[in-house]
Amino acid sequence: MYCIHCRAPVRYNRALVREHDGRTLAGLCSECEREQFGRVLRGGYADPSGACLFCSRPGALALPVHRIDLDDGPDDHSETRGYPVEATTPRLCDGHAGEAFGLKAERLRSEATLATYAVDDD
């Protein structure tokens, strides 16, 4: 997956996930996250209503952080990796997503991904 800003490969930071279908559009590397948002996304955002981080409009784009969950059960050890979208995941409305990433509202509602920032299988 590639960063929507600098196009560098994103290794385990954040993803941009459409709210309406859960599709990952691109990544956001830690350097571009700091440049664009400062420490806002790391600040323990917790609005279970799913509203935009910067206004009260509904979130159109979720910005989940990469997480690894380890389960060390008595019989099994398992690892789950991914970008889970949860109630406390920061979200942006279509307007603020447009300002931050240059995404048009239609792109956030379409079935297409951002081909330039294609998501790899790894």
Image: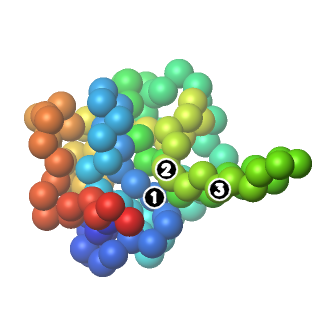
The Cα–Cα distance between marks 2 and 3, rounded to whole angstroms, is 13 Å
Mark 1 sits on what residue? 14
The Cα–Cα distance between marks 2 and 1, rounded to whole angstroms, is 7 Å
Give the residue type that dot 1 points to: Arg
Give the residue type that dot 3 points to: Glu
Mark 3 sits on what residue? 79
Q: Are marks 2 and 1 in contact (CB under 8 Å)?
A: yes
Q: Residue at x 21, y 61 (%)?
A: 118
- Where does the N terminus fall, quadrant-wise? bottom left
Left or right of 8? Residue 78 is right
Q: Residue 101: x, y in percent? A: 25, 55
Q: Residue at x 27, y 59 (%)?
A: 119
Say above or below: 23 vs 78. above
Q: Which mark is residue 60?
A: none
For mark 1, does the 10 Å Cα neighbourhood hold few (<14), some (14 to 19), or many (20 or more) residues? many
Q: Are marks 1 and 3 in contact (CB under 8 Å)?
A: no
Q: Residue 8: x, y in percent? A: 30, 78
Frontmost residue, 66 versus 106 = 66
Left or right of 66? Residue 109 is left
Mark 2 sits on what residue? 83
Mark 1 or 3: the one toward you: 3
Q: Earlier in the sequence, mark 2 or mark 1?
A: 1
The Cα–Cα distance between marks 1 and 3, rounded to whole angstroms, is 19 Å
Give the residue type that dot 2 points to: Tyr
Frontmost residue, 51 versus 1 = 1
Q: Earlier in the sequence, mark 1 or mark 3?
A: 1
For mark 2, does the 10 Å Cα neighbourhood hold few (<14), some (14 to 19), or many (20 or more) residues? many
SS of the residue under disc 1: strand
